[in-house]
Image: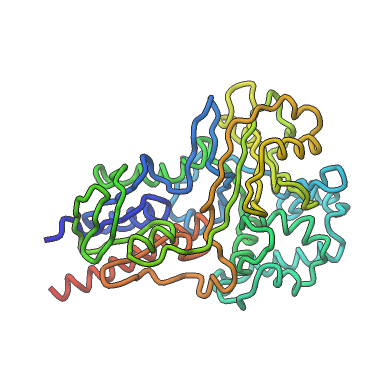
Amino acid sequence: MAEWDVIIVGAGIAGLTCAEELCSKGLKLLVLESSDSAGGRIATDEYEGFLLDRGFQVFLTAYPEAKRILNYPELKLNRFAPGALIWHDGKFRRFSDPWRKPGDLLATALSPVASAMDKIRIAKFRHDTTTADLRRLYKSPEITTIEMLQQRGFSPTVIERFFRPFLGGIFLEQDLNTSRRMCEFVFRMFSTGDAALPSDGMRAIPNQLASRLPEGVLRLNSPVKAVRAGGVELSSGLQLTAKHIVVATDEPTARKLTGNSPESEANRVVCMYFAADEPPIEEPILMLNGQGLGPINNVCVPSQLAANYAPPGQSLISVTALLKAKQEPQVDAVSSQLREWFGSTVYGWRHLRTYPIHYALPRQVAPALEPVEKSSRLSTGVYRCGDYCDTASINGAMASGRRAAEAVVNDFEELRTAD
């Protein structure tokens, strides 16, 4: 007889969402996590009084699945200013969302980042992505983001100065070969909500989900070696049985656990953190590289949003560099470019840590999102969830976790009826 109704392998966002849904149905559940904490790729380290998210990430408050499942006030969210400052021709140029920050309307209108026609096209793009039903966006013709932007008539200037660094920092690839469906989803989320950071770091999101699970459901430091219908084998050799197994890991791990080739494409990123006595900018806003030169894609100062990110009297600077070749950018090269942007004050900055993340996001090059919502069933009694099964985002991970739970409950009910 099976020990559990369901075993979930992996306690990332997808696995935790799936677990909460299944617990609400009264199923006997076990969640196995290989590491010493829940969260998967969403994690935060404490280092010398700083909070260092493992890779620069933001939480988008418009995520529909997140609004359904998370307690926002408990997260103590701190919002970025809408828009961005774009480095071009030796200075930062403001490019804001005038619908959400009307005070920046004139600065945005006069910005050389985009022509008047580009700004009109952005307005139409915003209208089209925010007024259409989300499922309709998910069924738009599957082409790359760069093809979609070109088809919409955007000039090479605005693509290079705004879209490439902005979307490249989200997709973690600057060629903009990511599916246009992912692009339209992301643009909708940024247009209808805020980009934010929890006061206690991005770890607060999985921690909130994990805290709601009944005691004993989550088992940490329990790596799984193999998955089969009816049970799992731990790396220790222990065999555990369940009526249903949900594999809630990244795609390469899921394929390996189920006996398939682990090969899959992923986008990589390097995040560097620096400490400073003074912030290089007072405003809580994202700064983008609008010239495409040097290793830096974007910079922000998390401690200007949430004071907890740095100890008193200190500022935390986050730098994101996309890997354009196999060689990772070095601290000296990044520091040199930072001095171009912020001047000699950078000499006083102290490098804290570098995070090279080799599986940051599943690569969703068109037609990767065909369809967007992928099936949860792998085989009889074995299911999957993760952001590779949906849009590569926190929302996609949550949505896939919910769908996996729904599939399990449906099959569980059919088995119970048959018995």
- Classify 347 as above or below 361: above
- Classify 134 as above or below 235: below
Left or right of residue 247, residue 181 in this image: right
- Residue 186: x and y, percent? 61, 60
Tell me the quarter of the image containing the N terminus. Answer: bottom left
Name the foreground residue: 256 vs 220: 256
The residue at 21%/64% (across/down) is 230
> As drawn, which residue projects farthest toward the bottom?
141
- Residue 316: x and y, percent? 63, 32
Tell me the quarter of the image containing the C terminus. Answer: bottom left
Left or right of residue 190, residue 84 in this image: right
The residue at 25%/59% (across/down) is 6
The residue at 33%/57% (across/down) is 21
Quarter occupied by residue 364: bottom right
- Residue 86: x and y, percent? 78, 48
The residue at 66%/54% (across/down) is 325
Name the foreground residue: 185 vs 367: 367
